Amino acid sequence: MAIEVRPASLFEDVRAVLGPKTPGANVCWCLSYRIPSKLNNELRGPARGEYVAELCRKGPPPGVLAYDGDEPVGWAAVAPRSDTAFARSRVIPHVDDLPVWSLWCVRVRPGHRKRGISHALIAGAVEFARAHDAPAIEAYPLDNGDAKVDLTMAYAGIRKNFERAGFAYAADTTSVLAGHPRIVMRLDLR
């Protein structure tokens, strides 16, 4: 299996990974950390997808997609922290004043899991941030040890996958997701 990771500039491919099964459904579309909470609450149904379509048309793309051949099979959200809710978070601390990028969501489509795609997505997100001159990239994964994580809440990733990608522990947070504490992990890119 040769997985290729590319910038998420094609909305139809983003929709294949993040979009709802029914067009009017209120799914996340990976917007909750990307936009202010008021706007996140106002965008309903198809308006959420339209917002993401606009992000795909603008630069830089809102993340990266993993492909198995021509089929999009995974997604990772990555952007400058200053453009996300993490810039204002009271539960996820800033380690320093570097203009880091944030990687906050890794999603692999059902039927494609357990094939290393999340590892490819993390590596692709790192390269995407590096290509945009990010000095460092941060992630906010679950520090779950060997405990199983509910797949619905595993979007933040798990500590061992980021360690495997070269990220190092940077700070504790007061954020808890699915019963597991989240931590700040960082990879310097310069």
Image: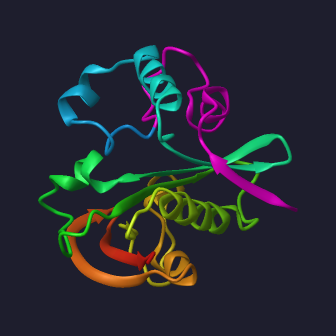
Indicate left or right for 85 with 19 as reference. left
Indicate left or right for 136 with 160 as reference. left
Name the residue located 54 percent from the left edge and 57 percent from the top edge.
128
Where is residue 147 drawn, in percent x and y? Answer: 48, 78
Where is residue 46 drawn, in percent x and y? Answer: 46, 15
- In depth, the one of 172 and 124 nearer the eye is 124
Q: Is residue 24 magenta?
A: yes
Name the residue located 56 percent from the left edge and 27 percent from the top edge.
20
Name the residue located 28 percent from the left edge and 36 percent from the top edge.
35
Where is residue 70 drawn, in percent x and y? Answer: 83, 40
Give the colour scheme shown. rainbow
Query: Does 136 sit above or below residue 70?
Result: below
Indicate left or right for 65 with 155 as reference. right
Q: Quadrant of residue 11?
A: top right
Q: Quadrant of residue 96?
A: bottom left
Where is residue 28 drawn, in percent x and y? Answer: 42, 35
- The answer to whether residue 109 of the structure is visible from this angle is no
- In depth, the one of 145 and 102 nearer the eye is 102
Query: Does 154 sit above or below residue 36?
Result: below
Q: Quadrant of residue 31?
A: top left
- The answer to whether residue 114 of the structure is visible from this angle is yes
Q: Considering the image in quadrants, where does the C terminus appear?
A: bottom left
Q: Considering the image in quadrants, where does the N terminus appear?
A: bottom right
Q: What residue span does the magenta drawing correspond to?
A: 1-29
Query: Does 102 sit above or below residue 48?
Result: below
Total numbered labels: 0
Name the residue located 47 percent from the left edge and 72 percent from the top edge.
158
- In depth, the one of 153 and 99 nearer the eye is 99
